[in-house]
Image (cartoon, rainbow, N blue to C red):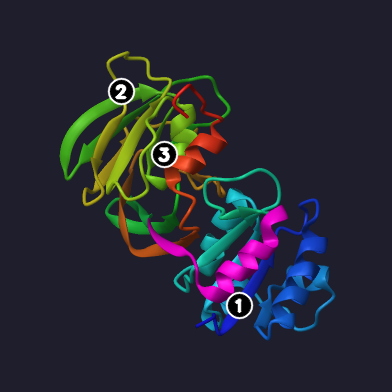
Amino acid sequence: MSAKLIGLIAHAAKHGAASLVKTLGVEFKRRGTALKYEKKTAELAGEPGGVSIPELGKACDILVVLGGDGTILHVLHDLKKHIKPIFGINLGSLGFLTCVNSSAYLKAVDSILARDYILSQRTLLAVEVRRKGKSIAQFTGLNDAVISRGEHSKLIRLRTRIDHAVLTEYNADGLIVATATGSTAYSLSAGGPILMPDSGVFVITPVCPHVLTNRTVIVSDTSEIEVSPCQEQDDVFLVVDGDEPMAIKRADTIHIQKSALSLPLAMLPEMSFSEILRQKLKWSGSAV
């Protein structure tokens, strides 16, 4: 049985977005499928009646997102609690979160209408900032929460606890707390490991630590992670999934744990995560 209502969202600034949106619209409609467009996407397609991303989340059965991994992150944040399955079509090279490249749009249409895809339930981070015990900000993240210094070339000290027990005090440029999905993002660049999406863990990776024994730590995703500055510093910031930074004060504690929500991310049955890694990272060898 095909999806009842499909939402289309495109990164309007991406090369080829307008052409692909129009082509997909024609193809879905030719097959008798109901569509709903995000506002800017509707303008690209020359269609009336575009709505906001949260409205798409409320109304649609699946969201087809045209862009890259960053576009999917943006859509997820705008959806808030109205999360629906996302099928990503990459306008460029293959991404870690997208299903197919734009050249395979017909395969995408076939897979969506036949429901020939697997929904990979991706863990989300629930990030809360507390100041003197009072909650002052809450975020949801798919990839990571990054605590880092600002423009000044000065290390920051971050006290880190796991399930209320002190782990260590990091003296570093920053600290990354990533999901398994986010292990292929900033954490990987900082020397962290690659984790399979269903591995059920978080990875804590220091950025350029001053103490060489400060290495990546992997903890269960049932853990609660607490991070707080060890001293008053004016240039400590929290960024979740590359969004707007929030200034962190000495009295603040950042609480990070597994969200009650998850992201159903569409994956093609024949495209395993190992295959995505091999293509994206250009791995090769005599046995490949």
Question: Residue shown at 48%/20% (left/top)?
Answer: 154
Question: Residue shown at 69%/73% (left/top)?
Answer: 38
Q: Tell me: residue 71, above or below residue 162.
A: below
Residue 48 position within the rendered picture, expressed as x and y whole percent measured from the top left: 80, 82
Task: Write down the quadrant of residue 194 in the picture.
Answer: top left
The numbered mark, 3 or 1, whose residue comes first in the sequence reads 1
SS of the residue at dot 3? helix
Residue 228 position within the rendered picture, expressed as x and y whole percent measured from the top left: 32, 38
Extreme front residue here? 287
Span of residues in magenta? 102-122
Task: Tell me the kind of residue under disc 3.
Answer: Ser
Residue 100 position within the rendered picture, expressed as x and y whole percent measured from the top left: 61, 54
Residue 194 falls inside the magenta stretch: no
Task: Write down the quadrant of residue 106 in the picture.
Answer: bottom right
Which residue is identified by label 1? 6
Q: CA distance from mark 2 to mark 3?
A: 15 Å
Which residue is identified by label 3? 183
- Callout 2–callout 3 Cβ contact below 8 Å: no
SS of the residue at dot 2? loop
SS of the residue at dot 1? strand
Give the foreground label among 2 and 3. Answer: 3
Residue 185 visible in the picture:
no
The numbered mark, 1 or 2, whose residue comes first in the sequence reads 1
Question: Residue shown at 52%/61% (left/top)?
Answer: 77
Crowding around mark 1 (Cα neighbors within 10 Å: few <14, some 14 to 19, many 20+) is: many
The numbered mark, 2 or 3, whose residue comes first in the sequence reads 3
- Which mark is drawn over residue 215? 2
Residue 19 visible in the picture:
yes
